[in-house]
Amino acid sequence: MSRQTRSLSELPEYYFKLTTKQQRNWRKNTKKIQYNESLREQYAPYRPSSNIIRTHLHHQTSVETVEKLIKQAKETKIFIVDTEGQIGELINSGALIQIQFVDSINDSTIILIETNFLPAPQTTLFNKIKELCSIIFNNNNDIVSWGCVEKEFKEFHHLNLINIGNIIKYNLQFLFSNPNGKPITHPAREKREEATGCSFVCDTPGDDEFDDEFDYDDNEQPDKSNSVEPTSLQDAVVRTFNRFLDKSLTVNYWKCGIDLNLNTWRNKLFSRSRYDANIERQERNKRLQYAINDCTSVAELFFHMYPEKMNNYLITPEPEKPTSSNIIKKINNDLSDVSDDELPQIRTPRSNNNKQRTTHELIITTTQQEMNEIMSTTQPEQKQLQETTSTRKLTKQERQKIKNDKFRLKKKYKPSFQNYIRRPIYYKYDYKKIRSQLMDDNITTSHQIKINDNNDEVSIGFKSNELKERAKLRITPDSIEHMHGHVFIYYHVGFITQHDQILVIQITQRLLTTPKLYIQQFVDGTNLNECETMQTQLPNTFHHL
């Protein structure tokens, strides 16, 4: 299939038939395609540097194959995980799970779990696959992912296949983007943490193709070099290895059946006008290589950042326990016949320094469980904290504290939280009435609205200085807004104080009949000097700040 190209300068005809949300999504995807193609032209393609053994897990996989993987997983310490989602599905969209067994720096095994072709849950094969996943995501193993590992498996919960237990998490995106440990926030997605307990935003290009709840500025290009923002895997590979990692297939047709042994390529899916077997096989092989590259690139970045892990990536296999039979066999193998020429040498006295030992020592070895306990006690304090977090569920108060801390940091450091205006308000004015008034004035705000009861004023935040200035113009001094059966009068009282303030006067509809003309003149600005007279005539209807 030909490579897809788009241009924002030349919009296709069908673009104008799309909804506003679809047009925004089209522009966003176009930018991603253009950025991906620009990197393709500048850098050589990425290729895995290690030997890869791939294994597909689905309903045609044999039980013996899974049992071999279970044995291998028990001897492996480091695992790289990644997932892919199906295009067009908003819930349960998980289609592919990639897990790389880091056997050595030069050899790795990658299993590809195609969730759309799993065996029935009551079968032995399914239980074996579930047992394999349980071993991987437990036993104090190192789980490396580009992003939050809980978010990676969010769309796979319905399968009841993976339960994250006692592991050591490496969110490589967070560690790569924030070497100093600064908190991550995405400028276009001010999301709070979900129940998973993740305290940072995971942003891989294209992972949220159909998430358009936020407005994107088409003229704003993100600064890829800013370490405060989460770095994409594609940019990390470029910056570290000067190689191009193709991300054009993120969120695609991943439930097509990648393994050619499933024979799904015999059906027309990727062919254009008529069925073409070569195209169907090529597209599946392309997705296979894409899934492998996503894992191996993360593994290479991990060893680049933590070179000490190269010599400490395997759990030492449990040695064979000494028995009477294998001890005798070992001794017999070590013995040899003595010739007549060697007898004089044997009878010759030797010094104690050169005396050779012929006794076999009994070596006491540690079991795998003891090794795990030793490794767990020698891990850094940070890993112990991550392990504790993964083994217990955070309480509601702890999750709220994480949210509050994150929001406090955003208010302190993000420039978009510095655009706010303050206005005096009537002491009975609450948040609901303030939001309703802003909607009536067609004023949009995306940040916090805070009422200061001590000073009887409200602080309204805006995400840009332009919106802030626009709001200042729309909240004019002499404007009347009706809401909930009341009339709110705003007027300028600069003759009383040096600062521009707004005095909110609330008058019920029942009292508007008598002073209606008088108040209209007051609002028109013809009787501003008679403010005190009006307050004397209507003492029960005016409330001062």
Image (cartoon, rainbow, N blue to C red):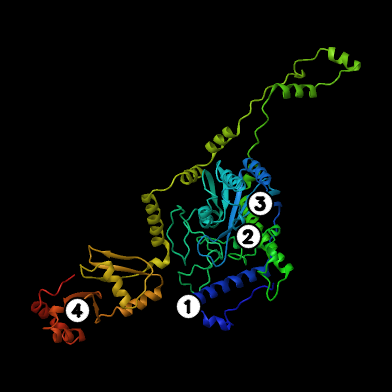
Between disc 3 and disc 1, whose residue precedes? 1
Q: Residue at left 10%, top 75%?
A: 539
Residue at the disc numbered 1: 20
Nearer-N-terminus badge (4/1): 1
The type of residue carrying mark 1 is: Thr
Under tag 1, what secondary structure?
helix
Q: In the figure, is residue 489 to the left or right of 417?
A: left
* Amino acid type, mark 2: Val
Q: Report whether residue 422 is seen.
A: no
Q: Helix, strand or loop at disc 2?
A: helix
Disc with the residue nearer the chain's start (2 vs 1): 1
Q: CA distance from mark 2 to mark 1?
A: 34 Å
Residue at the spot of label 3: 110
Mark 4, residue position:
495
State the residue at coordinates (48%, 70%): 212
Secondary structure state at the residue bearing disc 4: loop
In front of the other: 184 or 148: 148
Which callout, 3 or 4, points at the residue further toward the start of the chain? 3
- The correct choice, above or below, for 173 with respect to 28 in the image is above
> Mark 3 or mark 4: which is in front?
3
Q: Residues within 10 Å of mark 1 (few under 14, many from 20)?
A: few
541 vs 305: above or below: below
Name which residue lies at 81% across and 12% down: 349
Work out how far the residue at label 2 is from the one at label 3, CA to CA, in angstroms.
20 Å
Q: Position of residue 279 (x, y in %)?
A: 71, 69
- Give the distance between the C-alpha atoms of the residues marked 4 and 1, in whole angstroms: 47 Å
- Disc 4 to disc 2, C-alpha distance: 63 Å
Would you name the residue on which mark 2 appears? 237
Comparing labels 2 and 1, the label whose residue is closer to the camera: 1
Kindly indicate the quadrant of the structure image that contains residue 450: bottom left
